[in-house]
Each structure stands twice: as C-alpha cells, then as structure tokens.
Amino acid sequence: MTDLPTDLTRATAAVLAEALASKTISSVELTQAHLDRIEAVDGAVHAYLHVDHEGALAAARGIDDRRSSREALGVLAGVPIAVKDVMATRGLPTTCGSKMLEGWIPPYDATVVTKLREAGLPILGKTNMDEFAMGSSTEHSAYGPSHNPWDLERIPGGSGGGSSSVLASFQSPLATGTDTGGSIRQPAAVTATVGTKPTYGGVSRYGLVALASSLDQAGPCGRTVLDTALLHAVMGGHDPMDSTSIDAPVPAVVEAARRADVKGLRIGVVKELGGEGYQAGVRSRFEESVQLLVDLGAEVVEVSCPNFEYALAAYYLILPSEASSNLAKFDAMRYGMRVLPEGVDAPSAEQVMSATRDAGFGPEVKRRIILGTYALSSGYYDAYYGSAQKVRTLIAQDFDAAFGQVDVLVSPTAPTTAFKLGDKLDDPMAMYLNDIATIPANLAGVPGMSLPSGLAEEDGLPVGFQILAPAMQDDRLYAVGAALEGALTDRWGGPILDGIPDLPSAGAAGSSNAKGA
Ligand code: GLN
C-alpha cells in the first residue's frame, strides 16, 4: 500500500479507501480535513457554490458506524466527494449556475447522487459551473467564476470548472461532472486532473438539469486514472428512469486501470485534431506522450477523420436547438424564480414568463435559446438542424472507420492551456473553439478521457491528453490512460499536479502564493 500522507487532502481516493477499510483513519476525520481545507482556500478559488458541513459529517459518521459493526461496504465508502451543481440533490440547493434556480431545493436525488449516497460517499457540497453548463470557463456562472488553482487569474475550464478546481486545490479527492461538448475533459485538461465522459447512456441522466439531451453525459472526475475508474464504476450502470440508459454492465474500468497496459494496442493519432491552431507547448506535450506510448509497446498510426472539421458547426446548431427546448420549462410557474413585470397591474402569464426569463437567464443562455429557436423554426429546420444531424451521422461514420483500424484514438484535449479570466468572455466564437477536440465524441456518443500530459514550456501550465474509444469500450480509456500516467509520472518525477503552487490560505494571513516543490 502507498504511504498515507500526513495531510489527508493530498492522498488519492484509492489510498484513502484502503486507509478507511483498515480503520487507519475514519471518514469523519477525513471529511473534516476536507471541510477545513475548503474553509482555508475556497475563498480564493470559489469552486463551491454550496458546502454541506453537517450533511457531509453526518454521512461520514454513518459510514464509520457501519464499518464498526462490520457491515460490508463499497470500495469508496467514506471517501468524500463534490457534486456538480447540475445534479439534483435532495435537501441541498441545486442552481445549475443560474439565477433562475436560486433557492431551489430539489425534493429528489439524481440517480447518480443516489448511487453516491448508497456507496457511502459523503457529499461535501455542490460545485460551480457555467450557467446551465454552457461555457468553457465558469465565467457564465451567475455566481461568479471559479479560479484555476494553478494561477488564480486564469480559467479552470468549463462548464465543470468548479469540479476541476476542487480537485486541483485538494478540496475533495473526487468530483462529478457532465460533458455535453467537453465540460468534463477540458476542465480536467487545464487543471492537470483526470476526467471521463463515459459512453452515451453509460451513466444515468435522470435528475440532471438537461442541456442537450442527445449529447449530455455524466461522468467521473479525479486526480488519478485509477481514482476516476473507481468513481466511474460507482456512477455507471443501467437506470430504468432514463430511457437512453444502456442495459449492460459497466465496462471493467477499474480492472483496466489496474492493468495499465498498452502492449500490442493500436493507437490512432487523429490528423484533424492537432497542428494548426494548437499552442506549441500543447503540441509538444502531446507528441511526447505519444512517444511514451510507443515506448510502452503500442503501435501508433495516423488516422484521418475528415468530417471532424464540421463538428463544431454541427454542435452549435444541435446544442442550442435541444437547449432551447429543454429550457422552455423555466416558465416562472414551475421552478425557481418568478419576476413580475414592472408597471403592469394584472400581468398575463406570458408577461410574467417574459420578465422572469429576462431577469433569470444570463447572456450566453439567451444567445443559445435565440439561436436554437431560430434553427428549429419552420423554413429553417431542414437547412440548419436537419443538415447538422446529417453531419452528425458523418462524424459517427468517421469514428466507425477509424475504430476499424485502431483500438483507441488520441489527441490533445484542448487547443491551448488555461487562458486569463475575461480574455474570451466577449467573443463567443473564441470560447466555443476550446471544445474543438472534445465535441466529436459527444456527437457520436463514444467515450473519452482527459489526463494530464505535463506542463507547456512557454507558460508552465497543464496540458491535457485525450483518449477516445468505441462505444461501451470505456475500459480501454483506463488501460491506456493508466499506462501513460505511469510513464509520465516517471518523466516528471512525480504526479504532474505536484508542481502546482501553494494557494493563499485564509487561515495563514500573509502567506505567499509561492511556487511549490
Ligand atoms: N463548452 C461547451 C459548451 O459551451 C461544452 C459544454 C458542456 O459540455 N456542458 O457548450
């Protein structure tokens, strides 16, 4: 067993799970250590929208009691977790990063949350996100952005930047995310953490605030490939409450992560995802990782997916179309906010709806609702939505052809390292381009993972490496990811995240943000 660090918040979930099982530590002690860490650093990071001190400690006490009475518990029982605020949590606020849902306390749990509770993971709190999961930086959160723990002036990725920054600032060993176009993988890339978008239908969507139902996929976030696999195994599986849920066992992700083997595997470098438009340091870290895979015994070839070029355009028709329809339910009658129009004596339902949607939705959400409504309107439907769906089919065919030649595909996760907060806020196109490499997987429903591949030489910031596999072969992501992670740990002399600077701590006045070891 790997040694348990004195600071429990620095340990991996796998190590913590062993320490809990052997009663070296208690879940209460571990949960309290994370609550203390949140207290100390979240003022600077702003990763959490809501922290549930009492609920987390009560859950931890419950697990400790059950362990004392020798009950058989799940592997991760007692390991705390942070939950993206897109997931309904009974009794805990769920805002989805929007004013529209401010103060909403769901009367039920999302299936994923039920699974976490049943597996005994205390929920520390809810993590920040771009409003309704639209964005790549958390700057569209109605509650203000999260900050990248590598450099507090930079974005932690989005939409799930709360979950990635929680992990990179050691405020939780595990977190959940959702990935509609990259919201698990791109935040992982820019923070040197790990995130997986499972096969579409592999993890239940029941109880998630829907963005684009044909693309949305919940998935696990962690600091190592094995931790992410352990969480994937808890979150995944068939759910009769979600009509698109796959009725098959969760792929053997934990076994694959432990196997960590690429010998004889055929790996395809996607020609269209890389090169021009990708930062030099992103490209060099990518090439270095590919070489490490070759050294480990994989066979690497270049593969062309010509229709990926149209993925972004198709996505930004399909996503707004589905989003405009999903967000129609925020009508001021059923959920959350209700605003009465000013100066109207007896306002009609339409007037209340319009005043509420005007006040409750932020500019990015409005932009996409307008785009989607336009794309779906009669006379334009075939030209826009219909064409985008055809492109989607072509992209799925590109994947089929590629997976006829290779076992997995690889690319950089994002074209650049973390940019500065504010840099792309007024330029939606520039923001959308962050997901150029992640979107094809959502359009085709195939699984993808991002893991850290090192730091770019020009700015010292993390770079993500993306692995894509055929549907229901999620285990391949973990076998390749864990093998590469091992080689990269040797290359960097330890986990890449160890290079992160110390954060200013609220408790230690005057402590500097000096570069750590
Ligand atoms: N950044 C992408 C978007 O803005 C992806 C969002 C997501 O995956 N939820 O749509």
Image (tube, grey):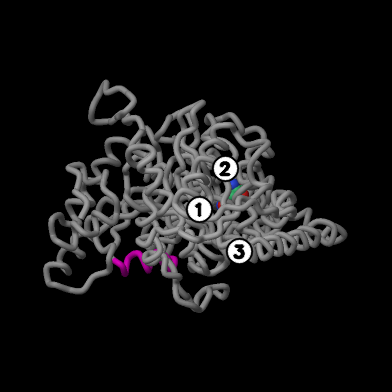
Q: Quadrant of the C terminus?
A: top left
Tell me the magenta residue range: 108-119
Mark 3 touching mark 1, by CB under 8 A? no
Q: Secondary structure at mark 1?
A: helix
- Please state which of residues 276 and 81 is positioned toward the viewer in this rendering: 276
Residue that carries the numbered disc 1 in the rendered image:
101
304 or 381, which lies in front? 304
Along the horizontal axis of the image, is 23 left or right of 230?
left
Q: Residue at x 23, y 42 (%)?
A: 36
State the residue position of label 3. Answer: 445
Q: Residue sitting at 60 percent across and 39 percent down?
A: 415
Is residue 464 shown to the viewer in this render? yes
Q: Position of residue 109 (x, y in %)?
A: 41, 66
Left or right: residue 15 versus residue 83 is left
Kindly tell me whether residue 339 is visible in this rendering: no
Which amino acid is tagged 2?
A: Ala
The CA distance from mark 3 to mark 1 is 29 Å
Q: Is residue 502 left or right of residue 410?
A: left
Mark 3 element type? loop
Residue drawn at x 43%, y 41% as measured from the top left:
192
Q: Which residue is mark 2?
A: 414
Query: In the image, what residue type sits under mark 1?
Result: Leu
